[in-house]
Amino acid sequence: MRDLEELKESWRKAKIDPSRLEADNRRTADRLASTKESVNRAQFNQFKLATDYWRAFVVSVIGTILAVLYTPVLVLRMDIPVWLCALVAVFFVVMAFINLSFYRFVYNIHFADLPVVTGLMKAFQIIRRHKILALTRLALSLVLIAFLAVQLYIRSEEAEGVPAPYIAGIVAAIIAIVITAALKYRRQFAFARAIKSELSSILSNN
Amino acid sequence: MKRQSDKEQRFLAVTDSCKEIIAKVCLLYASPSAPFEDLYQEVLVSLWLGLDSFRGEAKMSTWIYRTALNTCITWHRTSGRHNPGNTLSLDSLIVEPADGQEATAMKEELAELNRLVARLGPIDKALITLWLDEKPYDEISHIMGLSEANIAVRIHRIKEKLSRFAAEDAEGRQTL
């Protein structure tokens, strides 16, 4: 068994082959300089997450527009109450706002400039917010879909015509959303727990 | 175009002057699921992206360490998603030291150090990397964002941990 100071001394004296690293630096500089900044960013999880939320923002805006455009059809043809159509539109507006603000929050953090522990805390903050937003988004969507299902069911009872495909579709959507969300967020939630325990041990000594 | 070329020149000046720092951080964080070459490339991309926002408020080496450690820790956290690749060995990276010390003995020592450090958590690994590079506590404090007193306590504990790991390894070899 060697002494730690001895290992440290060897580490300090060790020289890394400079030619190999310099060649790497040049190749990478050429590649990065000729690539769009957005493409370079795309390999980092932070920017992947930001992109996800940007896409969700765009979908929410489209959803708002569609909700407004389809209101006459839903009200006149399917007998859905106006308040429910308004609720759908409000849901998409709220989602658009949430997605845009989270996108900006994630995109504007410069991890590289931050001290390591602060960076980890920010990463943890992002994950925690993402977790809360994901669950809120899921819960609101499910509530809205359930409202729609109930309304369709009530209308079908009143009209004595059973729009079974609609209700079956809605139930299938609920199941699909729950399964997808569970699979998607399981890994991120496990990571959040692991990083939280490491941070707690660090911060308790600070 | 000229601006991009200026950035390329600045980037090369930074990376060439600090290549040892980047490489050594990557060496300690490298593993079969996080190959050295991939880590090194990832750190270079981080430095490229952060170069425009670096305003010289901190020392250049502090910024390089922060970027390299943050990038390696982030990779460490998500390594499960990456495909195992070929990890460059210490043998192919370390060149013989100028003072004539036996290269084989040194490589053995470095391999042992690497094995021991690999058993630490990512934050402990960051602290021991800075201790190995003989950074003063105030600079470690700037890089890590922890108080100097906390750093002293943690480094002391990490050293105890590493000594324990080394003793366990030695014991294991004896029983074999």
Image (cartoon, coloured by chain):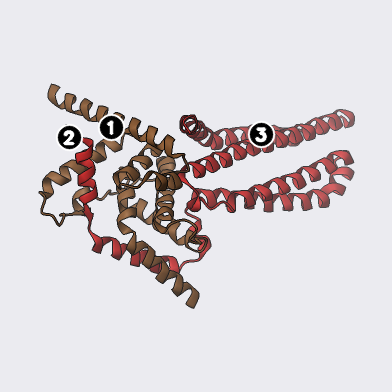
Q: Marks 1 and 3: CB-CB under 8 Å? A: no
User: Is A62 placed above or below B73 here?
Assistant: below
Query: Can residue B8 be spotted in the picture?
Result: yes
- Nearest the camera: A10 or B109? A10
Secondary structure type for disc 3: helix
Q: Position of residue B61 (x, y in %)?
A: 39, 56
Q: Marks 2 and 1: CB-CB under 8 Å? A: no
Badge 1 density bin: few <14, some 14–19, many ≥20, Cα 10 Å: some
Q: Which chain is brown?
A: B
Badge 3 density bin: few <14, some 14–19, many ≥20, Cα 10 Å: few
Identify the mark nearer the N-term, 2 or 3: 2
Q: Position of residue B8 (x, y in %)?
A: 42, 70
User: Is A164 placed above or below A122 here?
Assistant: above
Q: Which residue is mark 2?
A: A2
Q: Amino acid at mark 3?
A: Ala
Q: Which residue is mark 3?
A: A172
Colour in which chain A is drawn: red
Query: Can residue B29 be spotted in the picture?
Result: no
As measured in the structure, the alpha-carbon distance from the residue carrying label 2 to the one carrying label 3 is 63 Å
- Nearest the camera: A58 or B22? B22
Q: Amino acid at mark 1?
A: Leu
User: Is A70 placed above or below A25 here?
Assistant: above
| Image disc number at residue A22 | none
Q: Which residue is mark 1?
A: B162
Residue A19 image-quadrant placement: bottom left
Q: Quadrant of the N terminus of chain A?
A: top left
Q: Position of residue A40 (x, y in %)?
A: 48, 60
Residue drawn where x is 89% and y is 41% of the image = A82
Badge nearest the viewer, 2 or 3:
2
Q: Amino acid at mark 2?
A: Arg
| For residue B113, side relative to residue B56 (left or right) | left
Secondary structure type for disc 1: helix
